[in-house]
Image: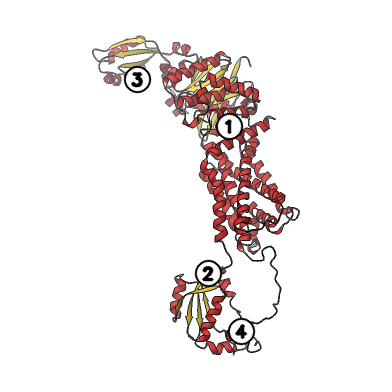
């Protein structure tokens, strides 16, 4: 039982030190709190009210009605008005607006022949008599902005002539499961658990061993009978608890502030987050045995953090990435956790359905712990 | 292991091209206070780290408390105490917490832990400091804490790497009193130092220079067996006298100490005082005095540059 006693000794020591390190202790709570509120409110992939410039060469009642209809979609807001197309282009180049809406002089002739107004039977696309009623010039460099405006391309214009809206039957019925209102925050909050845990867990432990070396404690530790694995386990446990506190803050506030549902059971949530916390902590320990200084440890943490944010499926869907990027994402614990936590929180997925991801996380954690223990030599050479 | 606590033969450790410890032979009798004397960078710390199993030798072998190194380093670590040169306990823990941690790491049960912690707190005069953070203590207090932690698990062999380099002379004297207490209780103590007065307190010393052992033995025996005579000069123009004597074949070294010159003359010289008198100016007194450990050190390390060039 001396092994257990030594693990407890390290554990107790970490808690003593952590308790005195007020800033770190504060960050445990503040990082998830601030970041959740920040990202929860800030990140929104449903673009609304894109600033645009209106170039109305028609200057008619019809053009004013058209502008009102376009603004009613809430996709754009006309913040500038001009009659000069060159001026409009300059505004786009200067990032004052992201798009220009150009209404030609012959709006009326175009509108009556347009299939969008529903006067005639829809002509075939090569029918030269039908032309678009107006033009959008878009800053296409941001594909999200471009996509939002592209959605206006086939906008029905029946209301323009006070005709009832076309109540045509859609080709496909689309049912949005798990997030029927299509709120971005529903997907962001569980994902944020993964990002914040990646950041804090790896950062805490990556500094753990190297800090002892920097402060000269390692030379004392390695002349005692402690085994490397005991040191590693003792160092991990306090941070595990911290990880769970952070998960509680994020999901609790997510429910309170953003009304993010919690579909799965707490037991499933516990298993999924436990495995991810362990995987992140053991990765941090491996970093800590490689790094020569705390600065190096921090750099290596960022090395893992950025791909975890960008490739894990937190920001962009995994399915949309090229195969090579998917293979890189596959070795990141965050990727597997994103699927698993969103599964549990949003879709009430059971552990069986997520088993592949969970086995990966468990394997990663055990491998990391072994590598860290093997790399931590009780020698100075 | 009644005879020798430490045996080493040809112990060598190289860092790249540099040999920090070079072909070191050692025999430390159990129960003695054994000192490594040498300047900074002479290989004292490396020797300590080799003998505690923290470093593996590049060549040679060592046996410490009967354990062959480096193979049995882990078994050895349970039986030794090591006080590192720089304070290596946790500065952000209190005295009590540091001792508790050390006790637990050595796997002590609750009863033994309490008994031992109470014992070292009393012995090292730390009872009033238990709630004090180690980082906010004075050098002498920190040194006592470090020694308390090193002897907490009652090791039979204690390594102290320059234990008194950061404390005042009075603290140093008190510290040595506790070392003699430990020694009287049967603990073998290996201590490194660059202070001559500290080395003189050891029962055995080894003089290290550039990784090599230049001399070893009891301090008294080393002083008695010095292959040189010491002439002390007082009065007159000491700087001129020093310049006049330096470079003479039989003069080993000339050093000014306060208002005196200390001249080491080779033992082959029949009348060293006459030799010195030739060089000094009028009004100077010269006479032979007893050698001290510093003289031993100077003589023992004087060949170093020449040997280095030959190697």
Question: The residue tagged with tag 2: helix, strand or loop?
Answer: loop
Looking at the rendered image, the quarter that the C terminus of chain A falls into is: top right
- The residue beneath circle 3 is B255
State which chain disc 3 sits on: B
Question: Which residue is located at x 64 percent, y 66 percent?
Answer: A181
> Are discs 1 and 2 less than 8 Å apart at CB?
no
Would you say residue A293 is visible in this rendering? no
Please tell me if label 2 and label 3 are on a single chain. Answer: no
Residue A158 badge: 4
Where is residue B30? Give x, y as percent. Answer: 58, 16
Which of the numbered marks, if any, corresponds to residue B176?
Answer: none
Rendered image: mark on residue A221: 1
Picture quarter with the N terminus of chain A: top right
Q: Which is closer to the viewer, label 3 or label 1?
A: 1
Q: Nearer the viewer, residue B160 or A379?
A: B160
Q: Position of residue B36 (x, y in %)?
A: 50, 21
Residues indicated by labels 4 and 3 sit on the same polypeptide chain: no
**Are dots 3 and 1 in contact, CB under 8 Å?**
no
Tell which tag, 4 or 2, sits nearer the viewer: 4
Q: CA distance from mark 4 to mark 1?
A: 80 Å
Q: Earlier in the sequence, mark 4 or mark 2?
A: 2
Work out how far the residue at label 3 is from the one at label 1, CA to CA, in angstroms. 43 Å
Query: Relative to the observer, which residue lies in front, A54 or B297?
Result: A54
Which chain is disc 4 placed on? Answer: A
Report in which chain the residue with disc 1 lies.
A
**Compared with residue A113, is residue B24 higher up or lower down, i.e. above or below?**
above
Q: Which of the two discs, 4 and 1, labels the residue nearer the N terminus?
A: 4
Query: How crowded is the residue under tag 3: few (<14 C-alpha within 10 Å), some, or many (20+)?
Result: some
Q: Which residue is mark 2?
A: A141
């Amino acid at each position: 039982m001396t092994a257990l006693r030594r693990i407890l000794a390290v554990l107790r020591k970490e808690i003593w030190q952590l308790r005195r390190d007020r800033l770190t202790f504060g960050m445990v709570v503040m990082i998830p709190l601030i970041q959740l509120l920040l990202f929860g409110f800030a990140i929104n992939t449903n673009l609304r009210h894109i600033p645009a410039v209106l170039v109305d060469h028609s200057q008619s009642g019809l053009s004013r009605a058209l502008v009102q209809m376009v603004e009613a979609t809430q996709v754009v807001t006309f913040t500038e008005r001009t009659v000069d197309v060159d001026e409009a282009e300059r505004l786009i180049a200067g990032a004052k607006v992201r798009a220009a809406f150009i209404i030609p002089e012959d709006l009326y002739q175009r509108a009556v022949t347009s299939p969008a107004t529903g006067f005639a039977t829809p002509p075939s696309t090569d029918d030269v008599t039908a032309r678009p009623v107006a033009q959008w010039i878009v800053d296409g460099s941001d594909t999200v902005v471009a996509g939002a405006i592209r959605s206006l391309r086939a906008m029905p214009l029946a209301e323009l002539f006070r005709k009832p809206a076309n109540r045509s039957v859609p080709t496909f019925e689309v049912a949005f499961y798990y997030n029927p209102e299509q709120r971005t925050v529903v997907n962001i909050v569980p994902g944020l658990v993964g990002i914040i845990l990646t950041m804090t867990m790896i950062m805490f432990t990556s500094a753990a061993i190297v800090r002892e070396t920097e402060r000269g404690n390692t030379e004392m530790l390695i002349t005692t009978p402690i085994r490397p694995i005991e040191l590693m386990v003792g160092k991990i446990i306090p941070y595990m608890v911290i990880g769970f506190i952070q998960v509680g803050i994020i999901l609790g506030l997510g429910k309170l502030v953003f009304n993010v549902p919690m579909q799965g059971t707490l037991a499933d949530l516990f298993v999924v987050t436990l495995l991810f916390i362990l995987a992140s902590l053991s990765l941090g320990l491996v970093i800590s045995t490689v790094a020569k200084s705390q600065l190096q440890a921090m750099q290596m943490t960022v090395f893992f953090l950025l791909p975890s944010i960008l490739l894990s499926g937190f920001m962009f869907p995994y399915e949309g990435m090229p195969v090579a990027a998917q293979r890189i994402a596959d070795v990141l614990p965050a990727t597997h956790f994103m699927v698993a936590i969103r599964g549990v929180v949003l879709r009430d997925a059971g552990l069986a359905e997520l088993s592949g991801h969970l086995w990966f996380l468990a394997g990663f954690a055990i491998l990391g712990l072994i590598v860290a223990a093997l790399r931590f030599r009780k020698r100075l050479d | 292991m009644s005879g020798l606590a430490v045996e080493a033969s040809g112990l060598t450790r190289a860092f790249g091209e540099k040999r920090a410890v070079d072909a070191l032979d050692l025999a430390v009798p159990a129960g003695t206070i054994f000192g490594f004397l040498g300047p900074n960078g002479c290989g004292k710390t490396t020797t300590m780290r080799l003998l505690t199993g923290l470093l593996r030798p590049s060549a040679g072998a060592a046996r410490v408390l009967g354990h062959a190194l480096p193979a049995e380093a882990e078994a050895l670590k349970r039986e030794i105490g090591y006080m590192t040169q720089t304070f290596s306990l946790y500065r952000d823990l209190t005295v009590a917490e540091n001792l508790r941690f050390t006790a637990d790491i050595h796997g002590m049960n609750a009863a033994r832990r309490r008994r031992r912690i109470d014992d070292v707190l009393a012995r090292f005069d730390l009872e009033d400091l238990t709630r004090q953070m180690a980082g906010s203590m004075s050098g002498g207090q920190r040194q006592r804490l470090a020694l308390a932690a090193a002897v907490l698990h009652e090791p039979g062999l204690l390594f102290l790497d320059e234990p008194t380099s950061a404390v005042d002379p009075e603290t140093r004297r008190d510290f040595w009193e506790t070392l003699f207490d430990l020694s009287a209780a049967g603990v073998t103590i290996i201590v490194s130092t660059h202070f001559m007065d500290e080395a003189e307190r050891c029962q055995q010393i080894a003089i290290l220079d550039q990784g090599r052992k230049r001399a070893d033995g009891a301090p008294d025996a080393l002083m008695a067996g010095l292959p040189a005579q010491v002439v002390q000069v007082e009065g007159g123009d000491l700087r001129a006298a020093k310049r006049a004597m330096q470079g003479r074949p039989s003069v080993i070294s000339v050093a000014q100490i306060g208002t005196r010159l200390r001249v080491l003359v080779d033992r082959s010289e029949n009348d060293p005082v006459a030799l010195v008198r030739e060089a000094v100016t009028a009004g100077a007194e010269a006479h032979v005095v007893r050698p001290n450990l510093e003289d031993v050190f100077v003589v023992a390390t004087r060949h170093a540059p020449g040997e280095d060039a030959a190697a």
